[in-house]
Image (cartoon, helix red, strand yellow):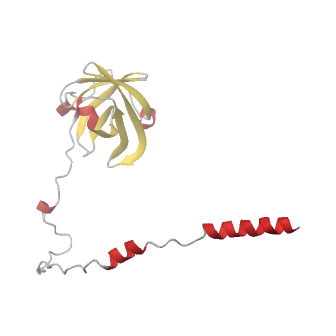
Amino acid sequence: MKFSHAVTGAAILLALAGCQRTSYSNMNAANSALPPLQAQPVPSVQSGQLPPPGVTDPSQFPAAPTTTTAAAVGTPGAPATALDVTKESMVGNWRVQSAGTSCDMFLTLTNLGSGSRGGTRGCAGELTTMGSWEVSGKQVLLKDRNGNTIGSLFKTADARFDGSTASGQPVSLSR
């Protein structure tokens, strides 16, 4: 019995030794010796009359994104052979062929501005800036992160879209 009391007592002492408080007196002394911060000058406050509600100065806001038509991105309207397209049929992963290279495009139904969120991986040129997409009639518009159209595609087969970028590079999507 004495042995178990001795072991229990030793265990308690070891546990208490691990709970010791460590003091960092050198650090506390160094921190208390720091001088107080000096007050900094405050710029003067301006006053003036605010414009009436609803009236804004257009120079204080960035320009709105431009909406580019298919003709402006090198595709003059829907070809006669273009097939109907829905947003739901576009969702998912697509293999992209553009300017002799291959990359991936991902399209979702998550709202982003006037379109839906999308992006590319491993692409070059204008397609690296893709941030969203939308369906307009029979065409699919690819947009950059500012909402500007960077490409236009038309459905040419069951799982294939063809078109061009704003600079005129041909683009094809397939699954």
Residue at x 33%, y 74% (from the top left corner): 30
Where 12 falls versus 128 (above or below)? Answer: below
Q: Is residue 103 left or right of residue 62?
A: right
Residue at x 39%, y 31% (from the top left corner): 85
Q: Is residue 157 left or right of residue 74?
A: right
Q: Nearest the camera: 13 or 156?
A: 13
Q: Position of residue 25 (x, y in %)?
A: 42, 75
Locate the N terminus by quadrant.
bottom right
Please give the count of numbered marks on the rendered protein: 0
Q: Nearest the camera: 99 or 57?
A: 99
Residue at x 79%, y 67% (from the top left corner): 6
Locate the C terminus by quadrant.
top left
Where 3 falls versus 160 (above or below)? Answer: below
Q: Residue 147, located in which quarter of the rendered image? A: top left
Q: Position of residue 119 (x, y in %)?
A: 35, 37
Q: Residue 10, located in which quarter of the rendered image? A: bottom right
Residue ranking furthest to the top: 100
Q: Position of residue 135 (x, y in %)?
A: 35, 37
Q: Is residue 58 left or right of residue 104?
A: left
Residue at x 34%, y 34% (from the top left corner): 120
Q: Position of residue 32 (x, y in %)?
A: 33, 79
Residue ranking furthest to the right: 1
